[in-house]
Amino acid sequence: MKTLSQILNILDTIGPAIAVVFLLKSKKMLSKEVLLVLVFCLIQLICNCLATVIERMAISTNFLLLQNNYWVYKLNSTASFLVILTLFLKYLLHFKPLVIHLSLVSYAIISILLIINGDGISQFSSGSSAFESIVIVALSLYFFYSKLINTHEEVSIPETSIFWCVVGIFTYYAGAFFIFISYKYVIDTSSSTLGALWRFHNILLFICSLYISYGILCKNYRTILS
């Protein structure tokens, strides 16, 4: 049982590592959309590895940045969100630049307000992570609608790698939303269950990585979604 828990604790690095390996070893030319998915996986891999290292070193050091790893999770969530926002708004849904700029400004204002309120500096950024999840889930649903409903019949969207990448991203953020929104409640009422909650988060990220890997291995990279 202890071995299983240890495996679940590192799934948040195993999953992205698998996806990164498949992406980097690909012999086909990756589209710009899939390259952004690679960046997302790299962010997950690097930040989750760093968070684990900091957690294990925290007891034996007095260095301020190693007292907790919340800042790493904030960096992870912010960088991941900006990459995925660019993926949807610029490449998948083709919004106008004004919409992109307004979205970034709105996100910056909300993030600053949450940080002022103490979210994401000395504790896990529950509020901003939940907000990011809602936005990404909404963009994913709109992507599925716009591509599956409005695309010509001769174009098979599920045969494209980016479709399965979006399925993975949607699965992760839809499930993780409930983890993020309930994080503070769990801390206040039953902190002993926090480990189980975070292992479920790692499973979601692992599933996301498997969907991305499936799209990379089995689908067409070069199909253009118009």
Image (cartoon, rainbow, N blue to C red):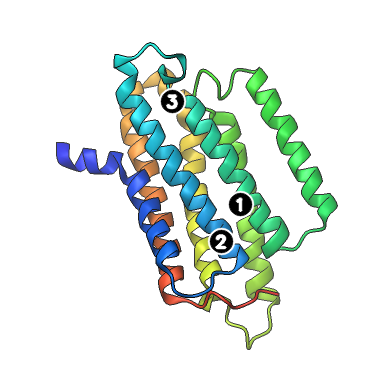
Residue 112 falls in which quadrant of the image? Answer: top right
Vertical arrangement, residue 178 with respect to residue 114, above or below: below
Q: Earlier in the sequence, mark 2 or mark 3?
A: 2
- Between the residue at mark 1 and the residue at mark 2, the CA separation in whole angstroms equals 11 Å
Front-most of residues 91 and 149:
91
Disc 2 marks a residue whose amino acid type is Leu
The 10 Å Cα crowd at callout 3, few under 14, some 14 to 19, many 20 or more, is many
Residue with the most extreme top position: 62
The residue that appears at 59% across and 69% down in the rendered structure is 31
Image mark for residue 35: 2
Which numbered mark, 2 or 3, is in the foreground of this view? 2
* Residue 219 position within the rendered picture, expressed as x and y whole percent measured from the top left: 47, 76
* Residue 151 position within the rendered picture, expressed as x and y whole percent measured from the top left: 68, 78
Q: Earlier in the sequence, mark 1 or mark 2?
A: 2
Residue 138 located left or right of residue 67? right
* Residue 160 position within the rendered picture, expressed as x and y whole percent measured from the top left: 54, 75
The residue that appears at 61% across and 41% down in the rendered structure is 132
Residue 170 located left or right of residue 2? right
Q: Earlier in the sequence, mark 1 or mark 3?
A: 3
Q: Which of the image's four quarters has the N terminus? A: top left
Disc 1 marks a residue whose amino acid type is Ile
Vertical arrangement, residue 62 with respect to residue 141, above or below: above
As helix, strand or loop, the secondary structure at mark 2 comes to helix
- Between the residue at mark 1 and the residue at mark 3, the CA separation in whole angstroms equals 23 Å
The residue that appears at 49% across and 45% down in the rendered structure is 43
Residue 48 falls in which quadrant of the image? Answer: top left
Q: In this figure, which residue is indicated by the disc labeled 3?
A: 69
Question: Is there any visible trace of residue 133 in the rendered image?
Answer: no
Disc 3 marks a residue whose amino acid type is Asn
